[in-house]
Amino acid sequence: MITKFKLSGLTCEACVKLASMRLKRLAGVESVTIKLTTGETEIIANHEISGKEAELVLAGSGYSIVKK
């Protein structure tokens, strides 16, 4: 299952790496792709990842999901 959302707070490749590592901690996540320039994030997992789940693992990191 593919889940997509947009992240804010990314300023460099190290930010992308840290956010990816945190999102990969979620159960069932197979891969995470984040575009630095746009914040577009794609998570491939064995189930849909909710925004709430993603926000919990990103808490305190300075990165957040952009609300539409």
Image (cartoon, helix red, strand yellow):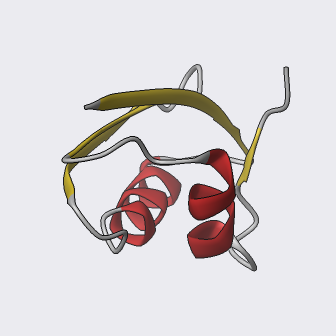
7 displayed left or right of 40:
right
Residue displayed at 37% across by 69% down? 26
Looking at the image, is 46 positioned above or below residue 44? below
Task: Give left or right: position of 36 versus 9.
Answer: left
Q: Is residue 47 visible?
A: yes
The answer to whether one can see residue 40 in this image is: no
Q: How many marks?
A: 0
Can you say whether 15 is above or below 21 in the image? above
> In screen coordinates, is 68 left or right of 35?
right
- Residue situated furthest bottom in the rendering: 60
Q: Position of residue 62 (x, y in %)?
A: 76, 65
Q: Position of residue 14 (x, y in %)?
A: 44, 60
Locate residue 38: give its quadrant. top right
Image position, residue 16 (x, y; %): 45, 50
Residue ID at (70%, 57%): 63
State whether residue 14 is above or below residue 33.
below
Q: Is residue 65 above or below residue 21?
A: above
Give the image quarter of residue 67: top right
Outermost residue on the right side: it is: 67
Between 61 and 50, the one lying in front of the other is: 50
- Residue 21 spot, x, y in % from top left: 34, 68
Quarter of the figure with the C terminus? top right
Q: In the picture, which quadrant includes the N terminus?
A: top left
